[in-house]
Amino acid sequence: MRPGHAFVLGSGIAGLSLAELLSRNGWRITVLDTASDIGGDASRSTQNWFHTGWLYAALPNKAAMLGCNKALKLFQQMYGSVVPRDVLNLDVGDNSLRYRSSERGWFASERVHYLYATSSSELSMVQRLLWKRHLQAVAFRRLRSLGYEAEPSGALEPSLVELLNYWEGSERGQDKYMVVRSTDAQINTRRVLNTLLSLLGDKTEVMAGAEYTLSRHGDRTSVHIGGETHTPDLVVMATGKSIAAQLKELGSDQLARRFKSVCSPIVVLNRALELPNFIRFTPNLPTTVNHIKYDIAGVGPRSTLGSYDYYPAGEAPDISPFANRICKRLNISTSDVANVYYGTKTEFTGSLERRYNHALDQVNDNTYFAIPGKFSQFPLLACEFAERVGLHTGVTNPARGILRMEIAATAPERCHTAPRAASSLSTTA
């Protein structure tokens, strides 16, 4: 397509990455977001966890793992020509991965320990027999095929040994786990979003708090805002959980039914636990939990704790039982909890190959929907978008200005200073 006028709906990582790609190809862009802040609610509220494929290695289908690995290898191709090396501080080789030290880099080398429970008391007899075998025969073999080392660690950090022993109520509780240090690390989501915003330039108009509607005229989408009707050359629907409702506005009910939004609880602590980043991984989702340290500017690192319990987006169940359970699990007092919130994730459902990955499809003659799947998969989304629309990824556009986003209300640093949302937490360890 020749450069024209694009309306990008949504200012999260999907919307901003595609708007940036259009911008460097000379397009005029209007970014609309119904929220009062730009940057997207889900994109600004993450734990800064950079997925490279490990989380999905044990799933029945390996497509999600491969998607994360492919996205990892696309960072340099998609952004090497427009982002300085000390910002894009990631080096990816055929069998190597390095995060260069940088004060303003997107990435940090704080890796993630995967604590695979293989004979925990929480596992059934069948799971104890099959789970370890599945990890060795399927998950670790898949990871090695991608060039990752997947050998269990020998000596563990004392704090981690103490935690594993506490969980199992045994001085040898650590023996019930295989612990592997992964390539997963941290991605500073705020820096990434700010970088993309700063590259949009003077041919871009960003409207936060925008009230607009969509309609379908023939085989094209029109945008109605402020008493005006626009039928742009391109419309990109990157509104996350709102995509389904917008598709219904356009009469695409069948597509709309394939979107599913869920929310998972996250606890933000007043301090950083003396523990590495880890995910306790079991075949049972409710007992799977992650600990990710989050560096708060001017304050220092704090611990965030996430779960794989999930609820339909829009529901607001009491979150305090989860926070109490997490604190008991980690043997800490609930007085350490700064705040709790629900993180939202939207998926385009379908086959096993489809789940957890990015999604991009054409709705009508001038409209696409786009969803990244994971924050760290956005280069994969941008690359496919470039191929589908006919954009160049190696060009630069120096005539671009500077825009900034604010911190989300549910970002860990805001939760750290805000009044606690879970008022019914017990005060025992």
Image (spheres, helix red, strand yellow):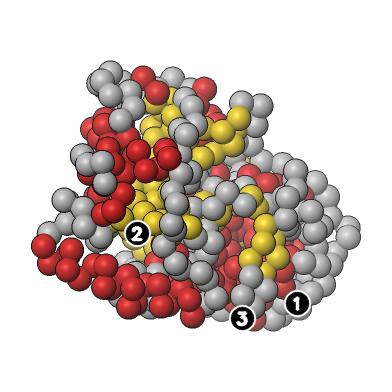
Of pointers 2 and 3, the one earlier in the residue sequence: 2
Residue 218 position (above or below residue 426): below
Residue 340 position (above or below residue 356): above
Q: Tell me the element at label 3.
A: helix
In which quadrant of the rendered image does the C terminus lie?
A: top left
Relative to residue 218, is residue 82 drawn left or right?
right
Residue 213 position (above or below residue 415): below
Q: Tell me the element at label 1.
A: loop
Mark 1 and mark 2: span between their CA atoms?
45 Å
Quarter-of-image position of residue 258: bottom left
Q: Mark 1: few, some, or many residues within 10 Å (few <14, many ≥20)?
A: some
**Between 372 and 290, which is closer to the camera in this rendering?**
290
> What label does residue 392 carry, if any?
1
Mark 2 and mark 3: span between their CA atoms?
43 Å
Residue 280 position (above or below residue 91): above
Which residue is depicted at the point 54% across and 48% down? 48
